[in-house]
Image (cartoon, coloured by chain):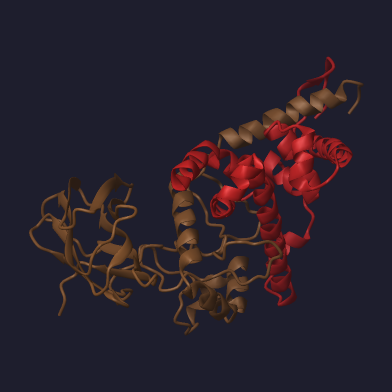
Amino acid sequence: MNSQHGDTQHEDFLRDEMRQALDSRHPDRTAMLNRIAANRAEATRPRARVARLAGSALAVATVLGIGGVGKWALADSHDPTPAAPPAATATPTPVPSVVATATAQPSREVTSRPRSAEPTDSTGPASAPAPSASLVRGHPGDTQVEKGTLWSDGSIEDSGDSVVTLRAGADLTELDLTVRVTQTPGLSSLGFESSADTVTATVTKQADALLYRFTLRAGATLTAGEYKLTAKWSGGDRNAADDTYEAYATSVERKRIHIYGNFAAKD
Amino acid sequence: MRDQAFHAFFERHHKELSGLAYLLSGDSSAADDLAADALTEVWKHWDRVNAAGDPAAYARGIVANLTRNWIRRQGRARRGLQLLGWGNDRERTPDVPAVLDVRTALKRLPYRRRTCVVLRYAFDLPEQEVAEILGISVGAVKSQTSRGAKQLADLLQDTRLPDTLDGWEVAR
C-alpha cells in the first residue's frame, strides 16, 4: 500500500469484505438446534462413554471419511455402526469423534457437508460423505420399548390418534415423552390427550414433523400404573411408518430410564 | 428457567457464533456444527457462565477453540492421506486462484492472526475482549490484528485492485 491513510483504507475494506461474507450466508438454525439436542442427549446417556471407546475402533475409517474417501472405505466395512447412514434412518449409535482433543468437547463428529446454497470450496479438503446423523430414535430396528420398571407401546387407535401406552412398575418422578409425527401432506395437529392429570403436552411444528412433548409437571409423581398419552392429528390417510416416540423418565428409585419405539403394527 | 434462558441466548447469538466459525474455518456446514457444539458447552455450564457475567464472550472463545481443533484435525487427516498416497495433489501446488474471496484469503492467515482480524473487524469487538477470548495481551492483539489486516488486504487486493488508486488508473 502506498499512503499514510493506508491503514484505515485496509480497515474499511476488510470490514466490508467480511460483513458481506457473513451477510450472504445463513446458518441452518434447525440443524444447529438438532445438533445441540443430540449433544445433550448424548451427555445424559451413560452409553455415550462406551460408545466413545467403541468408536476408537473406527478411528481409521473416520479419518479416511474426513478426507473424502470415506464412502469408498466404508463401503466394504462390516462394522455394524454405519458412519454414513442413508438419510432419514436412525443410527443405532452416532459415530463419536475419535480424535483426542485437549479441550472438553462434545463427541459428535463435526462434518463438512456440501450445502446447496453455497459453492463448495474446491481448494479445501474434499467434502466428507454426508452423515445425516439422524438423531431420532425409535424407528423400526432401533427400539427399546422397555427399560427397568417402564414398559411402553405405540399404536394407532383411530386414524388420527397416535397412542403411547406406558406401564410404570414403579412411581415416576420425571417423565418427558416426545411423540414425533412425521410431516405428510395435509397433516395438522388436533391437540393431545393424557390419561394422567399431571402430564400435559405442548405441540410444536417443525419442518419435517409435529412434535408432541408430554411432560410430568415438576414436583409431581406419576404413580405406578398404566397411562395412555395420545397425540391427535388430522391429515387423512397418512402413512405413520416413520412416526416415533422417545421418552426419558426417572423412577422413584432415581433410576434414569430411556425408552423409544414406534407405532408400527406388532406381529 | 435455565432452558428458557438458554433458548433466548441461542436465538440471540446462534447466527453470530456460526458466522464466527464460518469465517475462521471457511466451511459453512462445519461452522453450524462447531457453533452448535460451542452452544452445547454454554448450556452445560450455564449457571457458572452466567454468574461469570458474559456468556456470549465465553461462547466466542469456545467457538475459536473448537474451530482451531477442527482445522488441526482436517490437516492431520489430509496429511495422513498424502502419506498413504491418496492425497489431493492440487493441495500441494501453491497455486493462486484467479479470484480469492475473503474466506479463502482468511485461511492463509495463521490462526491467531485470523481470529484477531475476524473478531475485531467482522464483529467489532474491543481489543480487550479479544485479548480475553484468546488469552493473550492487548498488545499482542494489536500487533496480530495489524499484521493480519495488512496480510489479508494484500491477498485480496492482489487479485482485486480497484479501477483507480488515488486518482491513477490501475494498469491491468
Q: Residue A253 versus residue B18: which sits nearer the camera?
A: A253
Q: Position of residue B161 (x, y in %)?
A: 78, 29
Residue B170 visible in the shown view:
no
Say which quarter of the image contains residue A160.
bottom left
For residue A220, above or below residue A68? above
Q: Position of residue A17 (x, y in %)?
A: 68, 32
Chain given the colour red? B
Say which quarter of the image contains residue A41.
bottom left
Q: Quadrant of the N terminus of chain B?
A: top left
- Farthest-out residue, left: A158
Residue A247 visible in the shown view:
yes
Q: Quadrant of the C terminus of chain B?
A: top right
Residue at the spot x=87%, y=42% of the render? B140
| Residue A198 shown left or right of residue B148 in the figure | left
Say which quarter of the image contains residue A251.
bottom left
| Residue A132 shown left or right of residue A11 in the figure | left
Q: Position of residue A15 (x, y in %)?
A: 71, 29
**Chain A, hue in figure:** brown
Q: Position of residue A257 (x, y in %)?
A: 36, 70
Residue at the spot x=88%, y=29% of the render? A1
For residue A164, above or below residue B170? below
Residue at the spot x=30%, y=60% of the render? A177
Residue at the spot x=16%, y=62% of the render? A228
| Residue A188 shown left or right of residue A149 in the figure | left
Q: Residue A170 versus residue A138: which sits nearer the camera?
A: A170
Tag count in the figure?
0
- Farthest-out residue, top: B167
Q: Residue A35 versus residue A171: which sits nearer the camera?
A: A171
